[in-house]
Each structure stands twice: as structure tokens, then as C-alpha cells.
């Protein structure tokens, strides 16, 4: 749990790759679809990271992110909110 006095955890994943479905939305944000060896794919968003599109679609990379629930049409999924790309 997180809240007052207990910060939201930031996670790191190494050697992730685009599934082929990542795109730039509103000319500024990355709408991500990522995978990592032996793990299912996960969706997410990288606000103000549209300029990183070429990097994330051509090679593997490392990411820092927070996990957030995404509520859409009565269904809840786990998404990432990207904080940094290396």
C-alpha cells in the first residue's frame, strides 16, 4: 500500500521490446504495448514521450514506471505509466 508517508513504488524492467502496436497519440504521448522475455505483454502510456517512438520501436530498452489500474467499459486491467526510458 502507498499513501501519506509511504510513496508509490517505482519499478524497473530491463530489455523490454515493443510488440509492434506502440504508437504516438496527440503528437506528444506514447501509447505503449510492451513485452519482455517469458512474460505477457502489457499496455501503458508515456506522457510527453512521443519523441522516443523511434527508439522504442527499433531496439530493446529499459524502463522506469508505476503501475496503475485502467478502468474501461466495466473492465479493469493493469497498465504502466512510463516515467523514463534508457
Image: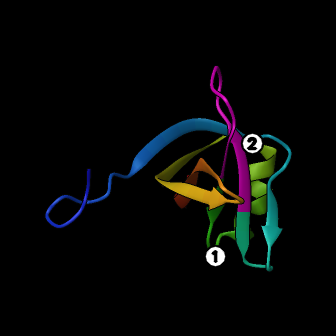
Residue 53: x, y in percent?
77, 61
Q: Earlier in the sequence, mark 1 or mark 2?
A: 1
Quarter occupied by residue 34:
top right
Q: Is residue 36 left or right of residue 31?
A: left
| Residue 39 visible at all | yes
Residue 7: x, y in percent?
24, 60
Residue named by callout 2: 59
- Alpha carbon distance from label 1 to label 2: 20 Å
Residue 41: x, y in percent?
69, 36
Q: Is residue 32 left or right of residue 14?
A: right
How many neighbours does mark 1 have within 10 angstroms: few (below 14), some (14-19), or many (20 or more)? Answer: some
Of residues 43 and 86, the one drawn nearer to the viewer in this rendering? 43
21 shown above or below 39:
below
Q: Label for residue 14?
A: none
Of residues 1 and 83, the one drawn nearer to the viewer in this rendering? 1
Residue 38 within the magenta-colored segment of the rendering? yes
Q: Residue furthest left?
A: 5
31 shown above or below 36:
below
Tag 1 and tag 2, C-beta contact below 8 Å: no
Q: Which residues are magenta?
A: 31-43
Quarter occupied by residue 39:
top right
Residue at the spot 41% in from the left edge and 46% down from the top edge = 11
| Secondary structure at numbered mark 2 | loop
Residue at the spot 61% in from the left edge and 59% down from the top edge = 71
Residue at the spot 79% in from the left edge and 79% down from the top edge = 26
**Of tags 1 and 2, which is closer to the observer?**
1
25 shown above or below 13:
below
Residue at the spot 61% in from the left edge and 47% down from the top edge = 77
Residue 32: x, y in percent?
71, 54
Q: Label for residue 48?
A: 1
Amino acid at each position: 500500500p502507498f499513501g501519506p508517508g509511504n510513496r508509490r513504488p517505482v519499478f524497473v524492467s530491463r530489455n523490454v521490446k515493443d510488440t509492434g502496436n506502440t504508437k504516438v497519440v496527440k503528437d506528444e504521448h506514447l501509447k505503449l504495448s510492451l513485452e519482455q522475455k517469458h512474460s505477457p505483454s502489457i499496455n501503458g502510456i508515456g506522457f510527453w514521450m512521443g519523441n522516443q517512438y523511434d527508439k522504442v520501436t527499433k531496439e530493446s530498452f529499459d524502463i522506469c514506471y508505476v503501475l496503475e489500474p485502467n478502468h474501461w467499459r466495466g473492465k479493469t486491467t493493469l497498465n504502466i505509466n512510463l516515467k523514463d526510458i534508457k
